[in-house]
Each structure stands twice: as structure tokens, then as C-alpha cells.
């Protein structure tokens, strides 16, 4: 049998060594790529959270598998961080602008109230009452208009500057009603003393009626009684009380006595140095930024200032540590505490008002009644009627709600 020669198939052909090497390298590269892809996928499964959060260690390790993708992730994370910083800066800037605008709005409201009060002081009581009624009638009419067209037609005849302001009618109504409230205060005090017969109908020795028609009783502790002066002022004196001697105080009476004790203790410190509060120089130093002016103030002025604030806290029935709001401080300070420019007669009346305030606390009078009593005392001596700044009002739900709020419906 003949033997086959294996070289016959290669006869006439040169061996393809280079091609064989290339094919072998390609197979090896393919194998390596598959291993790298498997390793890359395994790494992504284990470290996806770290990569998404921008973990630098995870990105460094990922660069071993896919440098381009790792670099792109790093760039995207850096861009996201910059965008977050930009948004945070914009939010902070917007917050600062809102705070600045709020301060400007508050200052504008204060200036508005001061102008209204100054105008009201120049009116007689009858004029103030008449103008307040006119404003209330106009507000009631405006809120009754059904639509923008009717509003514009009406306002074009009586108030052209309000044309196109139908959607702002509630805010306008509240602004005008704040003026009416100031005018009504100029027309007369918010509280009036009750006659003995009226107080007896409520089972009290004495009391006052508020502008809302509510009766505020004054029932002094046992062993004391109420005296009403010709001007309607009230004071607590020793004498027959409403209850029997020896009975324990109720919780309300205990609180009344506690606030009265705090007020009297504050006055013990305040009265001997009260005149320091009239110093324009000392008050001007309060306005120096960052409290730098405080270091140049007289000790007696600072002590009087602190004692006066403690007195106001007691009158307002604020618990220890509570703060007096700016509006409360403005009105109660003007009635009870000395101010630069106060005459000797006014300082004497304010001192008397402080003593009456303590007596009112002992009798259980609310802060509003104590304030009205002090205002009436100052008005009786100066000929001017007391004014109370009107706090900013919030817009209520509907026109009917607004009418009911001010008693116009």
C-alpha cells in the first residue's frame, strides 16, 4: 500500500506564519477583552453607588477598566457639584433679598402708621369719627362690587388711582381699615369704665367695657375694694372686699398677684432713676450698630431701661424670658415710660399711670384695660387723645369674611 506524503498539500505554497500569529493575537485580545468586560461589569455591580455619589476611590479604580468613562463621570460629578453650589448660592441670595425686602416693608408700614397718627392728631374727635365712618362705608361699598368691570367703572368716578386694582381689593380694604381704626382711637378711648350698677349686673365690684362690648370685671383680693374717680380712673384701696378674709387665693388671683409683685419690684428699681430715660444722648447711643454705643452709656440709664422693660413684661403678663414685640414696646413705652422731650407734668402722669397699672394687675385687669386706663389718664391731662398703632392685618378668605371681621356686615 502506498504511503501518503503530507507535504503534497503545501506544494507550491509558502507557510503563512505572519497570518497565524495575527490570528492568534486576535484570539488572545478577544479573550482578554472578554475578561476585562466581565471584571468591569463585576466592578460596576459592586461599586455603582460609590460611582454615582462621586466617590474618588471608586472612580480611580474604575479608571483601570475604562479610563474614558471614569473621566467622563468625574467631569459630570464636578459639573453637578458646581451646579449645586450655584443653586445654593442663589437660594441664599434670594433669602437675603426676601429678608431685606421684609425689613423695607416693615419700615414702610411704620412710616405709614406714623403719618396716619400724625394726621389723626390734628383732627377733632368728631372729625375723626366722621372720617372713620366714611372709610368704613367706602370699604363696604368696594367689597360689594361683583367684578372688575364694575369696580373700574365705580373707581373711575371716585378714586381713579384704584382702577385696575380689583384683585387687590382685600389688601386695599385692610390698609384703609387700619386708617379707620386709628381715627376711631382718636375719637375716643377703646375702654370705658362701667357704672357700679352695670358692674353689679355682672357680679363684679367694678369693671370696664371694651370696644367689642365685652365686660372686663375688676374683683380685688379679699380685704381690698375698688374706688372710681371722677375721670373714670380706678384704684385699689384697703377696705371691705368681695370675699371673706382668710380664703385661699384662686389660681387666677395668684397669677395676678405674681405679676403685680414683679411689676412693683421693677418700679422699686426704676422710679429713683426714671429721669435718665429722658436723655437724648443716652437713647441715641442705643442706635449705634453692634451695641458699640452701650459701652458709653451711663449705668443708671441701662438699669432703668432694663427695669422698665421688666415692668412692661409684667403688665403684658409675659412669662419670664418672653419677649415684647416691637408694636407692644412702642405703644406701652409711650404710655408708661419716660421719653426724651416729656414735660414734667407728663412725667408725673406717667408715674401715676405706672402705679395704676400695678393696681390693675392686682385687680386682675387685662393688659388692654390697663393700657386704656393709662391712655385715658394721659389724655385727661394733655388734652390730646391717646393713639394705639394698628398691627398689620392678614388678608382673610373672602370679601364677606373681611366685612364680618370689621363689623361691617
Image: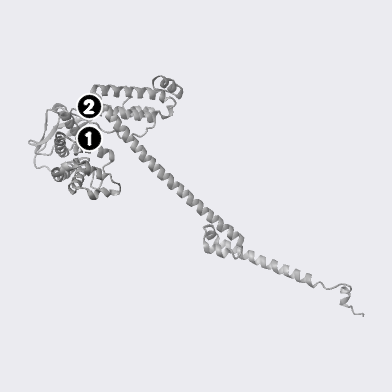
Is residue 55 positioned above or below 312 on the image? below
Which residue position holds label 1? 368
Do the CB atoms of the residues marked 2 and 1 lie less than 8 Å apart?
no
Q: Is residue 223 left or right of residue 119?
A: left
Q: Secondary structure at mark 1?
A: helix
Q: Residues within 10 Å of mark 2 (few under 14, many from 20)?
A: some
Which residue position holds label 2? 188
Residue 379 occupies quadrant: top left
Measured as percent of width and height from the top left, residue 225 is found at 10, 35
Q: Residues within 10 Å of mark 1 (few under 14, many from 20)?
A: some
Residue 203 is at least partly visible in this image? no
Residue 403 is at least partly visible in this image? yes
Q: Comparing marks 2 and 1, which lies closer to the viewer?
A: 2
- For this rendering, which residue is in front, 83 or 51? 83
- For this rendering, which residue is in front, 243 or 189? 189
Farthest residue, direction top = 157
What number is the disc on residue 19?
none
Question: In which quadrant is the N terminus drawn?
Answer: bottom right
- For this rendering, which residue is in front, 93 or 66? 93
Question: In which quadrant is the C terminus drawn?
Answer: top left
Mark 2 vs 1, N-terminal side:
2
Residue placed at 12% from the left, 39% from the top? 221
Q: Is residue 382 left or right of residue 128?
A: left
- For this rendering, which residue is in front, 116 or 9? 116
Residue 360 occupies quadrant: top left
Residue 217 occupies quadrant: top left
Measured as percent of width and height from the top left, residue 23 is found at 75, 68
Amino acid at each position: 500500500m502506498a504511503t501518503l506524503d503530507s507535504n503534497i498539500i503545501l506544494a507550491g505554497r509558502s507557510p503563512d506564519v505572519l497570518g497565524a500569529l495575527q490570528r492568534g493575537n486576535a484570539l488572545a485580545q478577544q479573550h482578554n477583552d472578554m475578561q476585562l468586560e466581565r471584571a468591569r461589569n463585576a466592578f460596576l455591580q459592586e461599586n455603582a453607588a460609590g460611582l454615582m455619589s462621586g466617590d474618588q476611590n471608586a472612580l480611580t479604580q474604575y479608571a483601570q477598566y475604562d479610563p474614558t468613562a471614569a473621566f467622563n463621570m468625574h467631569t459630570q460629578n464636578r459639573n453637578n457639584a458646581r451646579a449645586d453650589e450655584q443653586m445654593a448660592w442663589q437660594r441664599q441670595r434670594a433669602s437675603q433679598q426676601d429678608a431685606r425686602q421684609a425689613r423695607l416693608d416693615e419700615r414702610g408700614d411704620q412710616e405709614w402708621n406714623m403719618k396716619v397718627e400724625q394726621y389723626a392728631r390734628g383732627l377733632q374727635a368728631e372729625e375723626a369719627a366722621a372720617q372713620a365712618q366714611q372709610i368704613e362705608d367706602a370699604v363696604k361699598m368696594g367689597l360689594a362690587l361683583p367684578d372688575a368691570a364694575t369696580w373700574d367703572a365705580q373707581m373711575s368716578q371716585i378714586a381713579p388711582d384704584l382702577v385696575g386694582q380689583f384683585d387687590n381689593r382685600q389688601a386695599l380694604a385692610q390698609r384703609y381699615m387700619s386708617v379707620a381704626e386709628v381715627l376711631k382711637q382718636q375719637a375716643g378711648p377703646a375702654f370705658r369704665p362701667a357704672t357700679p350698677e352695670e358692674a353689679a349686673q355682672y357680679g363684679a365690684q367694678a369693671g370696664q367695657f371694651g370696644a367689642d362690648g365685652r365686660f372686663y370685671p375688676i374683683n380685688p383680693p379679699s380685704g381690698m375694694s375698688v374706688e372710681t374717680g371722677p375721670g373714670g380712673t380706678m384704684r385699689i384701696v384697703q377696705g371691705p372686699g368681695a370675699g371673706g378674709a382668710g380664703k385661699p387665693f384662686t389660681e387666677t388671683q395668684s397669677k395676678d398677684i405674681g405679676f403685680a409683685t414683679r411689676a412693683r419690684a421693677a418700679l422699686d428699681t426704676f422710679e429713683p432713676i426714671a429721669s435718665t430715660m429722658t436723655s437724648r444722648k443716652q437713647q441715641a447711643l442705643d442706635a449705634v450698630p453692634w451695641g458699640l454705643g452701650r459701652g458709653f452709656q451711663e449705668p443708671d440709664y441701662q438699669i432703668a431701661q432694663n427695669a422698665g422693660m421688666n415692668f412692661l413684661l409684667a403688665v403684658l403678663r409675659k412669662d419670664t424670658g418672653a419677649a415684647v414685640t416691637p408694636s407692644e414696646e412702642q405703644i406701652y413705652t409711650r404710655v408708661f415710660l419716660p421719653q426724651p422731650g416729656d414735660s414734667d407734668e407728663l412725667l408725673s402722669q406717667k408715674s401715676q399711670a405706672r402705679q395704676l397699672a400695678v393696681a390693675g394687675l392686682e385687680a386682675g385687669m387685662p393688659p388692654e384695660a390697663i393700657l386704656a386706663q393709662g391712655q385715658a389718664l394721659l389724655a385727661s391731662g394733655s388734652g390730646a387723645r391717646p393713639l394705639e398703632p394698628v398691627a398689620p392685618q392678614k388678608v382673610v378668605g373672602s370679601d364677606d369674611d373681611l366685612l364680618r371681621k370689621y363689623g361691617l356686615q
